[in-house]
Every structure is written in structure tokens, then in C-alpha cells.
Image: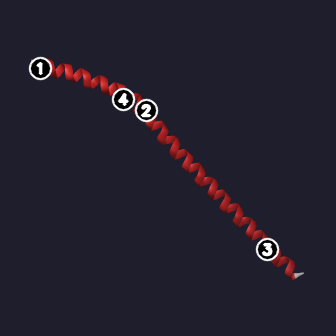
């Protein structure tokens, strides 16, 4: 009878360890996905601002040319 209790406790501990490791892996996976999503958002914002930067540089070049002439 005593051996069955020990085996049951060992099995329960193994199941708990497997659950904890699985939850940790899922958590790490979610953190990774969130990090990549955040980076994608920043890259999209940056690419939307590039045409504005080009337009500003062109306008400044016109202004600079007028000043030197």
C-alpha cells in the first residue's frame, strides 16, 4: 500500500512539472510574438514617414538654393 502512495506522489510531481514547463514555454512564445509585432508596428510607422522626410529635404534644398542665389 505504501509503494502505491509513493508512486502516486512521484507521478503527481512529474505532471505538475510538465504543466509548469509547458506554461513557461507558452509564455515565452507569447512574449516573442509580442516583441515581433511591436517591431513590425514601428517599421510600418517609419516607412510611412520616409516620404515626408524626402519632401522636407526637397523643400529645404529649394530654400537653400534661393538663399545662395
Q: Are marks 1 and 4 in contact (CB under 8 Å)?
A: no
19 horizontally vs 43: left or right:
right
Disc nearer the start of the sequence (2/4): 2
35 horizontally vs 25: left or right:
left
Task: Assign the N terminus to one quadrant of the image.
Answer: bottom right
Disc nearer the start of the sequence (3/1): 3
Q: Are marks 2 and 4 in contact (CB under 8 Å)?
A: no
The residue positioned 56% from the left and 50% from the top of the image is 31
Q: Which corner quadrant of the image does residue 15 belong to?
A: bottom right
Disc nearer the start of the sequence (4/3): 3
In this rendering, the answer to whether 42 lies above or below 65 is below
Spatial CA distance of label 1 from label 4 is 26 Å
Spatial CA distance of label 2 from label 4 is 9 Å
The residue positioned 24% from the left and 20% from the top of the image is 59
Q: Tell me the SS state at disc 2.
A: helix
Q: Tell me the SS state at disc 4.
A: helix
Name the residue at the left extreme. 69
Estimate how packed mark 3 is, as few (under 14), some (14 to 19) or many (20 or more) residues with alpha carbons within 10 Å: few
2 horizontally vs 21: left or right:
right
* Residue highlighted by disc 3: 9
Q: Are marks 3 and 2 in contact (CB under 8 Å)?
A: no
Q: Which corner quadrant of the image does residue 50 belong to?
A: top left
Name the residue at the right extreme. 1
Task: Assign the C terminus to one quadrant of the image.
Answer: top left
* Residue highlighted by disc 4: 50
Name the residue at the bottom extreme. 2
Amino acid at each position: 500500500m505504501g509503494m502505491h502512495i509513493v508512486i502516486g506522489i512521484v507521478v503527481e510531481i512529474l505532471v505538475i512539472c510538465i504543466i509548469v514547463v509547458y506554461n513557461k514555454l507558452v509564455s515565452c512564445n507569447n512574449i516573442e510574438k509580442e516583441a515581433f509585432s511591436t517591431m513590425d508596428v514601428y517599421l510600418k510607422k517609419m516607412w510611412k514617414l520616409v516620404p515626408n522626410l524626402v519632401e522636407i529635404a526637397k523643400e529645404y534644398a529649394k530654400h537653400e538654393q534661393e538663399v545662395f542665389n
